[in-house]
Image (tube, rainbow, N blue to C red):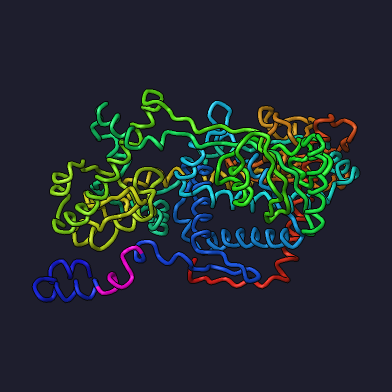
Amino acid sequence: MLHFIRERAQGWVAWVIVGLISIPFALWGVNSYLTGPSDVVVATVNGESIKQAEYQRAFQQYRDQMRNTLEDEFDPELFDSIAIKQSVLDSLIDKKLLLIVAGTLGQHVSNSVLNRTIQSTTAFQSEGVFDQDRYTSMLARVGLNPESYEADLRADLVRNELVASIQTSTLAAHYSSDNLLRLEKQRREVAYGVVPALSLVDQVIINDEDVQTYYDQNAANYYAPERVSVNYIELSVDGLSKTITVSDADLQSFYVDNQDQFVGPEQRSASHILIEGDESDAVATLAEVKSKLDQGGDFSALAIEYSQDAGSAQDGGDLGYFQREVMDLAFEEAVFSLQNEGDLSGVIKTEYGYHLIKLTGIKSGEGKSFTDSKSEVEALYRRQQAEAEFYEKAELLADLSYENPDSLDVVAEELSLEIKTSMEFQREGNISGIATEKKVVLAAFSEDVLVNKLNSSVIELSQSHLLVLHENKHILASQLAYDSVSPAITEQLRFEQAAEKAVEKGDELLSQMKSGTDGTALFEPSNWYAEKVVGRSSTDVSNQILQKAFSIAKPSNDAELLGFTAANGNYIVLKVSKIEEGEPSDATSAERDGLKSHLDRIYGESELLAFINSVKEEADIEIFQQYL
């Protein structure tokens, strides 16, 4: 379609197309096409909505988490599956249910607890002290503002409080851990013989007809996959910022024009006494407190006696230092309206109850000198200049790559950008480079790029990172020649048949041992391993032998015999002679405590899952699959 428009849309036809396109843009604006509706609902839980933006943020966070965890084994295509998308949504539904239940139980997190949690977060600190500038800038990097982050954090804290209450309601009994310790400490006496597959390879003869037949029957396994390499131009704010020419005069001027950005906010410290419940009772109680203060009473002592804020009462109501936009709005306005240290507020009502507040400290916002903030000034200056250049070049990138579709040369020359070349990659993408992005892979294998040899449309990797592709090399899938793979097939067939011979020989030896012949008389000395007592974590025998040895319920007679093929093709004849039950008393206190904690955690998680499932059965949940 795009190819047709490029070649046919000229004269009056082009104007008709432009007119048709411009109508919806004029009515609804470009932004709605780029960002989509902001209030799309993907699910409702008891009437409360889960918005598409919240879902997309959770999905991206999960994707990033899995990319960091799996590293080279990360598969981008996995996240196109509806199962993964549904799993992310299920998690959001569970969180929403827990939050609803917590609300009905009256659980909440006070502003003081929220404030302390934020200020104690290491990521928001500079030299061990909370840094407001660092806080806002770090949130901005991930597309958040303090209001949305604090709302999410408060919800997480409330949920965590409920989850902790449920999980700690179940504890593992001592007999449960003792039974597990008996199994964990159990030891078994084993002996085994090995029939090496490699020792039988020389007895196998593979003829050319066998190899040819195997190749013909498995030809699909011997294909070199389709691959492509692309030339591409990359436009990003980060890349442009490195090319910005900077002078001290420019930085000085930028510093003067934006000096307010290099001044820390005013901070105040306060203590409070919180009374919950009925308004008249709360006001009467605070009046009693105020009377005692007027008579010389100590605010800290009265807070310990009266305040119902569990997070601050034992500290005399102390909330520490905070700036604006951290506390509840009414609470904040009261604190910042007080004039002098020691001043008291009137009764202040918030969603948490009724407060009496004492101002205990004031820290004025302090400006940084140009010298102290030069590196920050330069980074902001480069970013600002790069953003302006980026938006100008982004429009040119789209126009030039479309108007000159046969190569990237004109685009590179006009925008002073480098033409880069990717490594070869398949339709499944790659584990490194630009082909880790699904958008890039789809564009590279699109009809425009692959068949029509045109530039791709502009690919938006992020709001500040764009790419345009052009085919560099296209290698079609091809059958690997018989001669190139026949040696490998020959060796594969030889080993497979040698492993089969090992099974035949091993079964014969196993039968003789079951008839009473001792293994030492049947196996070569180098292939027989005499009786030894092993535990589940022994390192002097292979894990495969340990797993088989401990998979036997209990020897039926004097010994239990079995045979199996190991992963390396060898056949193992295994003898398990006896079992020594473990003694719980042999466990160290650390082992016992660790197992107890493990069981408590398992039981707690099981109880939590059962709780969520029971709540979910009674909940009214509606999912709109089309928005996933």
Residue 398 image position (x, y, % from top left): 22, 56
Residue 497 appearing in the image: yes
Along the viewing direction, whichever of 563 and 293 lies nearer the viewer: 293
Q: Is residue 265 above or below residue 167?
A: above
Nearer the observer, 174 or 477: 174
**419 or 427: nearer the viewer:** 419
Q: Is residue 608 left or right of residue 19?
A: right
Q: Residue at x 85, y 46 (%)?
A: 172
Q: Is residue 101 left or right of residue 268?
A: right
Q: Is residue 585 left or right of residue 369?
A: right
Residue located 15% across and 52% down the image: 407
Please identify the quadrant where the N terminus is shown.
bottom left
Residue at point 24%, 51% (across, down): 394
Provide the residue span drawn in magenta. 23-31
Question: Does any portion of residue 120 appear in the rendered image?
Answer: no
In the depicted structure, whether residue 523 falls above or below residue 372: below
Q: Where is 558 relative to 615, above or below? A: above
Q: Is residue 547 magenta?
A: no
